[in-house]
Amino acid sequence: KLASDVSPADEEIRRRLITFSEEANGFFGYFAAHRIWLSPELCTQIDSFWGALKDAGYAAQDSITPHRETSRLDCRHVMSERCDPMKAAIEAEFRKALGGS
């Protein structure tokens, strides 16, 4: 697309996708450096979650017009369905490792 063809809404979506990508990469980078402290089962879950995040993010970035809304909904679905359970599992693992309940 030419710069003149990009709407402000497209620019906002692009900005959000870049932020999403940076934050997702930051999460996985931190996890990769600290995975030794987590159980193999949780590492497998996080790897699966990371794959779903990447797939949804790439699909949202790559789809320019016809499938963009579907890709954005897929991305939201991954986030809404998997983020909170993943966060709870990670927190529980750290509590267990630190001697909490």
Image (spheres, grey):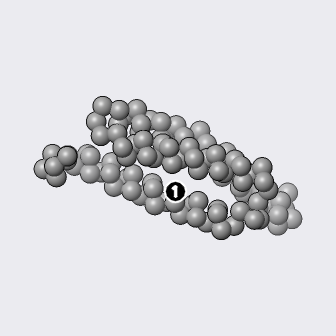
Q: Image quarter for residue 92?
A: bottom right
Instruction: Give how far across and how far down residue 34 sits, in percent.
Output: 69, 67
Pick the front one: 92 or 58? 58
User: Farthest residue toward the left?
Assistant: 4
Say which residue appears at 61% left-offset and 42% top-offset: 82
Quadrant placement of the C terminus? bottom right
Q: Is residue 79 visible?
A: no
Instruction: Give how far across and how far down residue 51 sits, in percent.
Output: 57, 47
**Label 1 element class:** helix
Say which residue appears at 61% left-offset and 47% top-offset: 49
Above or below for 101 versus 57: below
Instruction: Give how far across and how far down residue 75 sits, in percent.
Output: 47, 41
Left-right relation of 73 to 96: left
Amino acid type for the residue under numbered disc 1: Ala
Instruction: Give how far across and how far down residue 61 sits, in percent.
Output: 37, 46
Left-right relation of 38 to 4: right
Say which residue appears at 53% left-offset and 63% top-offset: 26
Pick the front one: 51 or 101? 51
Pick the front one: 15 or 29? 29
Pick the front one: 77 or 101? 77
Say which residue appears at 57% left-offset and 60% top-offset: 27
- Check disc 1 and report the residue beneath it: 24
Left-right relation of 73 to 80: left
Left-right relation of 39 to 61: right
- Density class for disc 1 (Cα within 10 Å; few <14, some 14-19, many ≥20) is some
